[in-house]
Image (tube, rainbow, N blue to C red):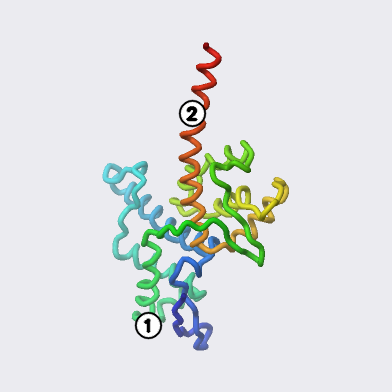
Amino acid sequence: MSITISINKQGKEQDVEIPVDWKDMTIKYFGQLATIISKHHNDAQEEKNEEASQEYDPFSGQKIELDDMQLLSMNQDIFAYVTGLPREEVKLVENHKIAKVLEVMGMLSEEYKYKGVRSFVIEGEEYFFPSEFFKRETFGDYIESTQLDMYIKDMQNGRFDVLPEQMAILCRKKDEVYHEDDIPEKAKKFSNITMDIAWEFAFFLTNQSEKLQKLFPTSFHLNKDEQEA
């Protein structure tokens, strides 16, 4: 699903499609948007810290509220990115077109509704999420998966480039054998996975990781008790 707007680009009227649904937006595309948003919030934070360092706690994890000028600047950058229009030419675009794009892009602030997907197809090949409790995975894969908290923090800070690599490690075709050397090329391909699948993977892996973290401590204490007996 997308909307089409007509803009004057390089002296010509051109139609530009704007994605308005997670399934129409790749990880790479959304990562760029997240980087733009994060940069403007970080810049605003630095400005406020310089003016009144006691008013904002940089370790709170909360994004600072942008003033009107900062918000305008961020919106210009977002509009320039999604339309491919040079930033200086955004000032020439009619206000109602910019408002329409930013309104539909508001879906980015909505919470994704988990559907329980367990596989996805990319370039004609089907890949599967890790099996229940990672029964078919190695302990090394489990160690990789427990770094999810770190990846989620990176995502919250606008770094979505970590997701394709994590998916490349844990998502595989039927009977595919893991080879570490294949990960970089596989991650490059997975950067074109759409965001609906990326969110499904994040939810799935979080749930599985929580189950495993409950399972492994129990096993550890049992072994410790057996050794002391």
Residue labelled with disc 2:
217
Is 162 or 110 nearer to us in this picture? Answer: 110
Q: Give the mark nearer the N terminus: 2 vs 1.
A: 1
Q: Position of residue 13 (x, y in %)?
A: 49, 88
Report the disc number at residue 8.
none
Label 1 secondary element? loop
- Tell me if residue 12 comes above or below residue 136 in the rendering: below
Label 2 secondary element? helix
Q: CA distance from mark 2 to mark 1?
A: 59 Å
Hey, which residue is sitting farthest top in the picture? 229
Is 77 or 204 nearer to us in this picture? Answer: 204
Q: Position of residue 62 (x, y in %)?
A: 34, 49
- Residue at 51% in and 58% down: 117
Hey, which residue is sitting farthest left in the picture? 55
- Residue at 49% in and 80% down: 16
Q: Amino acid at mark 1?
A: Glu
- Residue at 54% in and 42% down: 133
Q: Residues within 10 Å of mark 1 (few under 14, many from 20)?
A: few
Residue labelled with disc 1:
94
Q: Position of residue 39 (x, y in %)?
A: 44, 56
- Residue at 63% in and 48% down: 169
Q: Position of residue 214 (x, y in %)?
A: 46, 34
Disc number lying in front (2 or 1): 2
Name which quarter of the figure residue 124 lies in.
bottom right
Q: Residues within 10 Å of mark 2 (few under 14, many from 20)?
A: few
Q: Amino acid at mark 2?
A: Pro
